[in-house]
Image (cartoon, coloured by chain):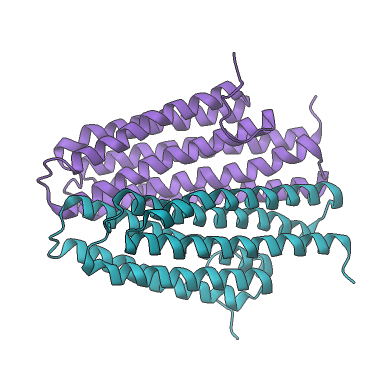
Chain colours: A cyan, B purple
Amino acid sequence: MRDAFHEDLDKISDQLVDMTKLVGTALERATAALLEGDRTIAESVIAADDDIDALRREVDDLAVDLLARQQPVATDLRMVVTAMHMSSDIERMGDLARHIAKVARMSAPNVAVPENLRPIIADMARVGQKLVQATGDAIGSKDVYAAVEIGRIDDEMDELHKKVFTTLLGDWEHGMEAGVNATLLSRYYERYGDHAVAVADRIVYLVTGRYGNPDEGLTR
Amino acid sequence: MRDAFHEDLDKISDQLVDMTKLVGTALERATAALLEGDRTIAESVIAADDDIDALRREVDDLAVDLLARQQPVATDLRMVVTAMHMSSDIERMGDLARHIAKVARMSAPNVAVPENLRPIIADMARVGQKLVQATGDAIGSKDVYAAVEIGRIDDEMDELHKKVFTTLLGDWEHGMEAGVNATLLSRYYERYGDHAVAVADRIVYLVTGRYGNPDEGLTR
């Protein structure tokens, strides 16, 4: 049997995992809206962001309530504080998916992304999915090595981000509007990855008590 | 005489105000580096971001320590939690100034921003300064009306952001690289403003207990 504090903490952890699922779906659908020029999907992603925001407030309220009732100290306290920071990062991932959906909506029924960039954007979405799933798993497991792996997956995102810029600065024949959109979209996917890494870093700090590169000095 | 809890809370509040000063200086100097093509200033902004990150960790550690030692409840608890969220937003403003400095460094001694955009960027920096000063004042005073004013100032930033895009999508004769840089720079300034608004929203929530538009239903 777990005590009341840890039961509440498990509940918060479950809600954070639920948030990762929602922001994963948001990214997937926003990308579909973007690459298919589908306004209806774009609208639904934008509307669904309210659910993510609401869940974030629920997590934060539960965390504050837990602090007030149980007055945890040491590691227990750190875990609750960390959960609040995580909810903030995951909520922001939802905002970024919403931004992508807004670009999709603005151009629909046309596709905002020129054909030569679509495979890169599709790859960014795929890596984003891997990141958010790994983040959900790491929150559930508190596994430092799983958290470290998130940084490695994010390197793939950064490579794709660079690839977008290489494409933009090459023989770009699609005009400035498509260029501005591509710049912003690439930034949104990249930031989505950064927030996954921020969550992972918090897990590493929670478990090891260290900031910075969590992998240094860790061997399996 | 204030009790130990409120003395510690004052210290946290002072540190948050110090953070706003550092990120204000960072924005001012990053913009100078950008508009003058000055690599030395750019480097110093990038290096100084470590101090902001360190101060943020100090605030967070002090807040966690305060929670553990004093075990506050109700409004006192909310104030400590809010301080941690604020430190996160203000630190992020420092990151954005660092991003601007990195664009400056990449182009120096040339100026990354074409002449016709420089006045708009200078205006964005000026509005950013107003925002960060107002944010520092609002943290110190916990004045809801000062916090609401921050949202109004940020509207100016959003207008300037739109102006950059209008310029980009008009007769842009500066090529794609300058276009990509302008897109990103404008986004950095705009996000800097958003984080100031996020801090302001937290002050409003702390004082009024309400999310959403703090101005609705408030009259002076």
Q: Is residue B121 above or below residue A10?
A: above
Q: Is residue B159 left or right of residue B24?
A: left
Q: Quadrant of residue A29?
A: bottom left
In depth, the one of A204 and A140 nearer the eye is A140
Q: Is residue A115 above or below residue B119?
A: below
In depth, the one of B38 and A35 nearer the eye is A35
Residue B47: image x %, image y %?
A: 40, 52
How many marks do you count on the picture?
0
In depth, the one of B83 and B198 nearer the eye is B198
**Residue B203 appearing in the image:** yes
In the picture, the quarter occupied by the N terminus of chain A is: bottom right
Residue A89: image x %, image y %?
A: 55, 55
Which residue is drawn at the image coordinates 54% and 65% (left, top)?
A: A212
Q: Is residue A199 left or right of residue A78?
A: left
Quick one: which residue is furthest to the top in this view? Answer: B220
Quick one: which residue is furthest to the bottom in this view? Answer: A220
Which residue is drawn at the image coordinates 75% and 61% (left, top)?
A: A11
Residue B189: image x %, image y %?
A: 36, 41
Which residue is drawn at the image coordinates 48% and 29% (left, top)?
A: B151
In depth, the one of B144 and A53 nearer the eye is A53
Q: Is residue A48 left or right of residue A155?
A: right
Which residue is drawn at the image coordinates 65% and 61% (left, top)?
A: A16
Q: Quadrant of residue A209?
A: bottom right
Q: Is residue B33 left or right of residue B13?
A: left
In the picture, the quarter occupied by the C terminus of chain A is: bottom right
Residue A111: image x %, image y %?
A: 27, 59
Q: Is residue B25 above or below residue B45?
A: above
**Residue B39 appearing in the image:** no
